[in-house]
Amino acid sequence: WSPGGEGGIRTLERLNTSARFPSECLQPLDHLSGVNAVGARLANSSAVMLLTLIRHGPTEWNETRRFQGRTNLPLSASGRAHALAAAGALRSERIERVYSSDLQRALETATIVGTPHAADIVTDERLREFDFGDWEGLTWVEIVARNPHLYERGPTAASYYAPENGETFEAVCKRVGAFLDDLMAQRLERAVVVTHAGPLHAMFTVLKLSASSPGEHRLSFAPGSISQLRIEPGEAKILRVNDRRHIVAS
């Protein structure tokens, strides 16, 4: 694969801002109505943004259900098909810029999505997946065998993740919140972000659209899925979450 867009691949400029999105977990998913207050930057902003969120297509490790954090694997053949399906689903959208994790599976997905629009691809390491530490490469069954207290949580209950020698969910929320803060400061009408399941859970948390709760595992982001939020002054509205219709249709 090759970079898409007239401007190629670059990195998001870090803004020296003082207002930051909160990283605490607040509302249970049972109350996820699609409209919630968000952080200081959003509350003080008059900007309105359509935020499109894409989880990268699958890799071989995704297909064998292994936890994949910083291991930098490319998309599988199925993963490229998922990315092409996502690109097709967004073909009528106006996409000028795609923000992406710099890990290969996300960057390849972002390039496939952005190329038909000649979009700039902007990489940001804050969109990387969890550092899974000692969990890296393990299945959920293997992780639970080492951490029995996680048995009732389920593999998508990201806020309970605290892998040995790895990264906590709170740490992921902190860096994702900083990314959102910088993104909002640019006052864009539309933004597309390609990232991983962990940062997507974190993004919903810092926007106060999900929380640490027994029901959290009900929210999941399948490889290649599309979610969309409408960001308005003081609130975020969920338009769709984990939409996989394009994958099924393909």
Image (tube, rainbow, N blue to C red):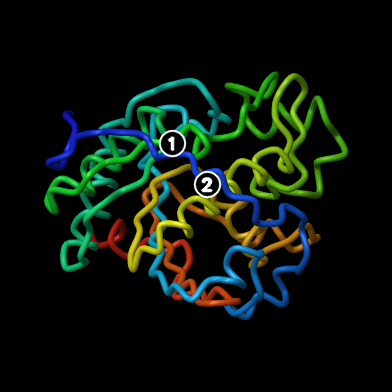
- What residue is rendered at 65% in x and 62% in y? 218
Report the side of 66 relative to 135 (left or right): left
Tell me where residue 170 appears, x and y as whole percent. 74, 43
Q: Circle 2 sits on which residue?
A: 179
- What residue is rendered at 64% in x and 68% in y? 38
What SS does tag 2 mark? helix
Identify the residue at the far right of this view.
Answer: 149
For marks 2 and 1 on the same chain, the one whose residue lies earlier in the sequence: 1
Mark identifier at residue 143: none
Whole-angstrom CA distance, mark 2 to mark 1, is: 8 Å
The answer to whether the residue labelled 2 contacts the one labelled 1, judged by CB atoms less than 8 Å apart, is yes
Residue 32 lies in quadrant? bottom right
Determine whether 72 is above or below 78 in the image: above
Tell me where residue 108 appears, x and y as whole percent. 28, 34
Classify 10 Å Cα crowding around label 2: few (below 14), some (14-19), many (20 and above).
Answer: many
Residue 13 lies in quadrant? top left
The one of 34 and 13 positioned closer to us in this rendering? 13
- What residue is rendered at 79% in x and 28% in y? 145
Classify 10 Å Cα crowding around label 1: few (below 14), some (14-19), many (20 and above).
Answer: some
Three-letter amino acid code at the position of disc 2: Phe
What SS does tag 1 mark? loop
Report the side of 129 relative to 21 (left or right): left
Report the side of 82 relative to 240 (left or right): left
Q: Circle 1 sits on which residue?
A: 124
The one of 23 and 86 positioned closer to us in this rendering? 23
Three-letter amino acid code at the position of disc 1: Asp
Tell me where residue 11 appears, x and y as whole percent. 36, 34
Tell me where residue 141 appears, x and y as whole percent. 69, 32
